[in-house]
Each structure stands twice: as structure tokens, then as C-alpha cells.
Amino acid sequence: VTVLFLMVSSTFFFNLLVSQFCGVYTSLAEDIKGHARLARGEIIIETFKSVKPSKWQKFMDSLNLDKRVDFEQGDIGLAGGIKDFEPALANPVAKDQIIRFGGNTDPSLPWPEKIDEDNTIEQTIHRTIQKSLQKMLGKGKLGSTMGTTDGGSSSLSGSKHSE
């Protein structure tokens, strides 16, 4: 019994020690990244001091930051950027972050109202409750349909419903 207790307690304390080391390593790794960035910044500043203002201005002019950079074909884009192409799957995005509105770009005109195509949380909760009730009552086994609050119908046969 004593040997078993010693084995269990030493295993516990060894695991505790390992977890402490992991926590310390994680915090040190974050600090090391911060210090590396600070050191890199110091090197950049020291190097920047040695660049002649005429060379710097020539470099800035070569970047063409005053020209507009288009996001997609036919898009006029914004000035002050550098265009860079990347593979489409490098940073997958489920929803486009840039919201585009058609029509005239006159600043005096009001913005068009955003049409929210996504279902609201209330509609999602309502459909989930309805499906759960149908399953509990046993009525959803034959693929019957049931009206929803938005005027559509949802199928309870297990396939995706269309509204």
C-alpha cells in the first residue's frame, strides 16, 4: 500500500512539475517574441538614420502610394497600398469582408439599406425548437412539413429545408 501511494504521489507531482514547466515556457516564448520585435525595431531605426533623405524620397516615389490599388477587376480601390497577389486558399474567408453597394457614389446620397440574408437568431431558435418538439412527439418520422413564422415551410425528414 505504501509503495502504491508513493508511486501515485510521485506521478502526480511529476505531472504537476511538467505542467509548471509548460506554463513558464509559454510565457517566456511570448516575452522572447516581444524582445525580438523590439530588437528588430532598434536595428531598423539605426539603419534608417544612415539613409540619405534623397534616397528615401526616391524610394517612396517608386512605391506609387498615391495611385489607387484595386481589390478586384473593375474596382477603383484605395490609394496608399501595395498590390500583392496570394493564393486563394492561403487565407480562406467564409464571408467577404468588403461590403459593396451598387449605384452612384455621390456623398450626398444616403447609403442603401443592408439586406440581411442570414437568418436571425430568433428564427434559428424557433426552427430548432420546432424540430425538437416534432422529434419528441414522434411526428417527424414521415417527412411531414410544418409552417414557420417567416411564411416558409421546413421539412422534418432530416434533409436540408429550403425557405
Image (cartoon, grey):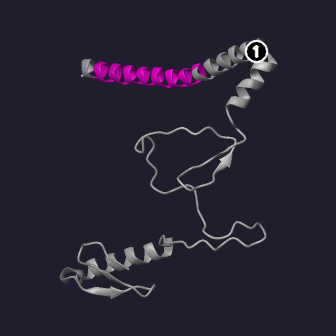
Q: Is residue 21 left or right of residue 55?
A: left
* Image quarter (top left, top right, bottom left or bottom right) of the C terminus: bottom left
- Closer to us: 8 or 113: 113
- Residue 77 locus on image (x, y percent): 63, 51
* Image quarter (top left, top right, bottom left or bottom right) of the N terminus: top left
In the orientation shown, which residue stands out farthest toward the right?
Answer: 53
Q: Residue at x 42, y 45 (%)?
A: 88
Q: Residue at x 53, y 22 (%)?
A: 29
Which quadrant of the figure has residue 51? Answer: top right
Tell me the kind of residue under disc 1: Val
- Closer to us: 34 or 109: 109
Q: Is residue 65 above or below residue 127?
A: above
- Residue 117 locus on image (x, y percent): 49, 72
> Local crowd at mark 1 within 10 Å, few (<14), some, or many (≥20)?
few
* Region in magenta: 5-32
- Closer to us: 139 or 77: 77
Q: Residue at x 68, y 69 (%)?
A: 104
- Residue 24 locus on image (x, y percent): 52, 22
In the orientation shown, which residue stands out farthest toward the left?
Answer: 142
Q: Is residue 68 above or below residue 135?
A: above
Residue 9 is one of the magenta-drawn residues = yes
Residue 106 is one of the magenta-drawn residues = no
Q: Secondary structure at mark 1?
A: loop
* Number of numbered labels in the structure image: 1
Report the residue marked by disc 1. Answer: 51
Q: Is residue 42 left or right of residue 143?
A: right
**Main SS type for the magenta part?**
helix
Q: Is residue 52 left or right of residue 4?
A: right
Which quadrant of the figure has residue 109? Answer: bottom right
